[in-house]
Amino acid sequence: MLQSYTPKCVCVKKIFFFSYLCPVAAYHLKWDDSNLEKNIGNWAVHIIQLSREKRHLDRAKLMKFWETLDRHMVNNKPHLRF
C-alpha cells in the first residue's frame, strides 16, 4: 500500500510537484509596459519582457530564451541531447 507523501515545506502541493518532482522549463511572455499578474509572479517561470517600440531587441531576448532552455536540458534532460 502506498503512503501519501506530504511535503515538509510551505509550498502548495501542486507547486511542489511541478517545481521539484517534474522540473520543466516554463516561460511567460509579456510586454514591458504591462504589469505582471500577481498569480504569475508565484509561478516558477522565466519571464521574458518584450518591448512594443524596441522590436530590434527581440533577438537578444530570443538568445536568452535558448540559453536558459539549453541549460535546463543539460541539467534535467541529458538523454534528449545529441
Image: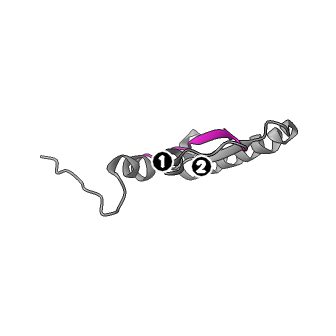
Which secondary structure, mark 2?
Answer: helix
Question: Does 50 sit left or right of 68 as displayed?
Answer: right
Q: Which residue is mark 1?
A: 23
The answer to the question of whether label 1 and label 2 lie on touching residues, with beta carbons closer than 8 A, is yes
Which secondary structure, mark 1?
Answer: loop
The residues colored magenta run: 22-32
The residues bearing labels 1 and 2 have C-alpha atoms spaced at a distance of 9 Å
Q: Position of residue 30 (x, y in %)?
A: 66, 39
The residue depicted at 45 percent of the width and 51 percent of the height is 19
Of 57 and 40, nearer the camera is 40
Of 14 and 55, nearer the camera is 55
Q: Which residue is mark 2?
A: 72
Question: Does 42 sit left or right of 36 as displayed?
Answer: left
Q: In this rendering, is residue 74 above or below 7?
A: above
Mark 2 Cα-neighbour bin, 10 Å: few <14, some 14–19, many ≥20: some
Work out whether mark 1 precedes mark 2 in sequence or the reverse, and give the earlier one: 1
